[in-house]
Image: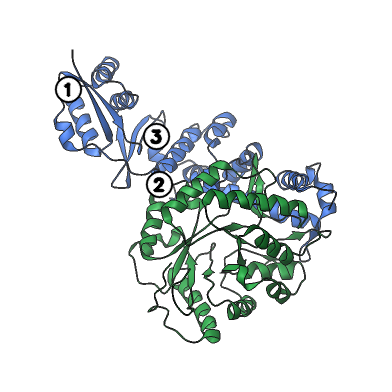
Chain colours: A blue, B green
Amino acid sequence: MDRLTLKDYQQLFSQAALEGDQSESYPRLLETLTPGGTLTGPDAIGVYANGVTIRLTEALGETFEAVWWVCGDEDFFALTKHFIQAQPSTTYNLSKYGKEFPEFLDEVSPFPDLPFLGDLARYEWLFKELFHTGQHESVSPDSIQSLTEDATIRFRFGHAVRLFASRYAIYDLWKLRGTAHEGKPPVEWDHPQFLLLYKKNRQIYINEVGEAEFSVLNALGEGQSIETALHSATEAHPIFSQEHISQLFQMVFHTGIIQHIEITPSS
Amino acid sequence: MTNSPSPHPMIGVGLRPTHYPYLHERPKTSVRWFEALSENYMDSEGRPLEMLESIRQDYPVALHGVSLSIVSSEGLRPEYLQRLKRLVDRIQPFIVSDHLCWTGLQDANLHDLLPFPFTDDARQTILNNIDTVQNSLGRQILLENVSTYLSFPECPYTEWEFLTLIAQESGCQILLDVNNLYVNSQNHHFDPLTYLDAVPTELIGQVHLAGYSDMGSYLFDTHSKPVYPEVWQLFSHVIARAPEVPVLIEWDDDIPEFPRLEEEAKKATHIWESHHGSTDAQRLSTTV
């Protein structure tokens, strides 16, 4: 063992744990160790190698619960095994593992009849991030009442606000996770869905909005003025009426998603 | 750590999310303190942290990490230390601990408590890393002995010699996991009392108790069972000479209802009392 430095040993062990007996370092590692109990050397390394796979799979299963629900055990575990081999963890926190899983699903596109998997995974990652985000302070109703029509007004949304759009009914799918089903998921998923997610009083809320409303929220979230955001939305969606606009802003104020209002007097 | 003139049993349990709904109601419990897993809170501003802060209002809290990787030959992750320090400053724990192990490489973290050879090379790496952590946090840390399923035959030190040496040379303390000690004694064929008697009492800053799983060809540290009689016996041996050391019941898999955890904590209290006399743990106040 004294021929191996700690650094060399850790490289050998890491390779063996990830690649198993196919790794070049495997025979060298076996020479250096004494297995515990009545294990063989490969079995002893296997205890650790299996542990890595189990822990990373559990982490993915916890975050991507709905993807697991849609795929079923066998297909989900095949996917996670493939992902784990392709994407070792570089984070110290196990619960942060899997950020690249949605893109992985897009790339490998494992099931042509489930084209929404990447978006569903992206939604679950976003939801997890929101869960771990602290509550922002919303502007008071008084601030909102002081808004004047002849000013250029911009909103800054709170940090516990997320917008999510998909060409598939991701929210409808996600809501059903955990329920019993066989074969295809029991939901009409082939239509778009636009979502506003936010925290209020430390609870997560999810509002489904229309496409035009979503485009306004998205523009406001990017820092555009109300005037510009509404102009773009009404041009793109002619049926977006004054009544829709009124309802949208009632919802915006009611949800407490605004953290700051910037008012620039018109010149 | 305690202002009490005489020692009292300081028995705590691990804070786990499955018990949040029960603890949210702030019931009267028979445990004296909680240990929280640092990584569950250092990257969250959400409900987990709110729960921890709520618990902290009523109990002393220890922060116990699993990802420090103090035996890493690549050095420590600055981001990890920064986030841990922020959490420590926020929670003001009475103990900050992690494990005497490494967890993988920075470009391929294995997320496990991994074994290493007890060599002078490792010793120097660990001492440097402990120095970095204790300076960064501005406080002493505790390091826990881990269960292992393989060992290295040509090492100049036994596990207990190495653990003791690290604590003596670094100024850290030992979090003595009696279950891990027992698991290793069976897996690596040594007398657990030899280990226990070799570790100076004054270096032991905390004790862990948990249940292992017998896999047939080895014992596996699963934290999924009650504490075994053999481990209670070793605990009795430790607590007889270290009455002031905080003791924690760990249960991380197949986690039972909270009252079942309290039963394990009461067993530990009874063993403590068998050595040091009966006391009403509920009535005693410990300032931490």
Q: Which residue is mark 1?
A: A242
Q: Residue B213: x percent and y percent?
A: 64, 67
Labels 1 and 3 positioned on one and the same chain:
yes
User: How far, Cα to Cα, is label 2 from label 3?
Assistant: 29 Å
Mark 2, secondary structure of its residue: loop
Image quadrant containing the C terminus of chain A: top left
Q: Is residue B71 visible?
A: no
Q: Nearer the viewer, mark 2 or mark 3?
A: 2
User: Mark 1 to mark 3: distance in Å?
Assistant: 27 Å
Residue closer to the observer: A188 or A201: A201
**What's the residue type where badge 1 is placed?**
Gln
Tell me which corner region of the image, top left, top right, bottom left or bottom right, holds residue A263: top left
Q: Amino acid at mark 2?
A: Glu
State the residue position of label 3.
Answer: A169
Mark 1 closeness class: few <14, some 14–19, many ≥20 residues within 10 Å: few
Assess whether mark 3 and mark 1 are in contact (beta carbons under 8 angstroms): no
Q: Amino acid at mark 3?
A: Ala
- Residue A210, how many percent across, how many down? 29, 28
Q: Secondary structure at mark 3?
A: loop
